[in-house]
Image (tube, rainbow, N blue to C red):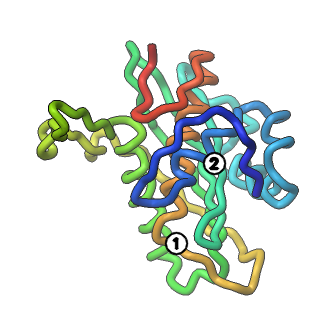
Amino acid sequence: MSEPMVASDLHWDHADRTFVLGPFQHDATGEDIAESYDEFDNRFMIRVADKAGWSSPPPAGRARGLAVHESFGSIAAQVAEVSVDQGRIRVHRVTAAVDCGLAVNPLAVEAQVQGSVAYGLSAALYGQLTLAGGAVQQSNFHDYPVVRMYDMPHVEVHIMPPSKVRMGGIGEPATAPIAPAVANAVFALTKQRLRSLPLKLA
């Protein structure tokens, strides 16, 4: 998978560098996607877009964004259906697909992808630390919010037929695509490119 050299802030995340590097470097238009990803990645994106109903328009006031990335020997792709209300980003639905090789326990794979979406959305929408005098100001969940039940979108997980014999990981690959998928959907709605976390509209 390619990682184009573009101006992008790079920071480390619990999952892997792909959370803030790879997926954010690809735009939402078909031309950019076709240029940035190889043939297999394109086929994978077409399949997850089909599962998300990409060919039909989303509900009024919403848009969809797509992102895909390969890490830990697995490929994860997500389509996020998003709305923006008075500057607030709301994620209503996430369609996720993963190719991790042979899924020995499909229910565990599904649960891991759902948890990864929740973790990634927390960083995408809320994850901000501020420093004062060299110390982090946030101390607990009252001033460092995470995604809660009312924020959590419906997550639909599709385990793709394995494309390879060797099994990949499923602990963290699905964390990476959610933030750029949401950012791409926001761009479709507002024409604003968001390239830093947490995602905030000007």
Q: In the rendered image of this protein, does residue 178 appear above or below residue 28? A: below
Residue 26: x, y in percent? 70, 39
Q: In the rendered image of this protein, does residue 28 appear above or below residue 201? A: below
Residue 165: x, y in percent? 74, 86
Task: Please state which of the two labelled residues, at mark 1 or mark 2, is closer to the viewer.
Answer: 2
Q: Quadrant of the N terminus?
A: bottom right
Neighbourhood count class around disc 2 (C-alpha, 10 Å): few under 14, some 14–19, many 20 upward: many
Residue at horizontal 64 percent and vertical 83 percent from the top: 167
Residue 72: x, y in percent? 59, 71
Residue under label 1, please give it. 170
Q: Label for residue 137?
A: none
Q: Viewed as shown, does residue 29 lie left or right of 135?
A: right
Residue 136: x, y in percent? 18, 40
Can residue 59 be seen here? The reply is: no
Residue at horizontal 28 percent and vertical 40 percent from the top: 150
Element at badge 2?
A: loop
Neighbourhood count class around disc 1 (C-alpha, 10 Å): few under 14, some 14–19, many 20 upward: many
Write down the quadrant of residue 59 in the picture. Answer: top right
Of residue 66 and residue 33, the one placed in the foreground of this image is 33
Write down the quadrant of residue 144 in the picture. Answer: top left
Can residue 17 be seen here? The reply is: yes
Residue at horizontal 59 percent and vertical 28 percent from the top: 63
Residue at horizontal 33 percent and vertical 40 percent from the top: 127
Q: Viewed as shown, does residue 14 lie left or right of 172?
A: left
Q: Earlier in the sequence, mark 1 or mark 2?
A: 2
Residue under label 2, please give it. 22
Q: Quadrant of the C terminus?
A: top left
Q: Amino acid at mark 2?
A: Gly
Element at badge 1?
A: loop
Q: Amino acid at mark 1?
A: Ile
Measure the alpha-carbon separation of dots 1 and 2: 18 Å
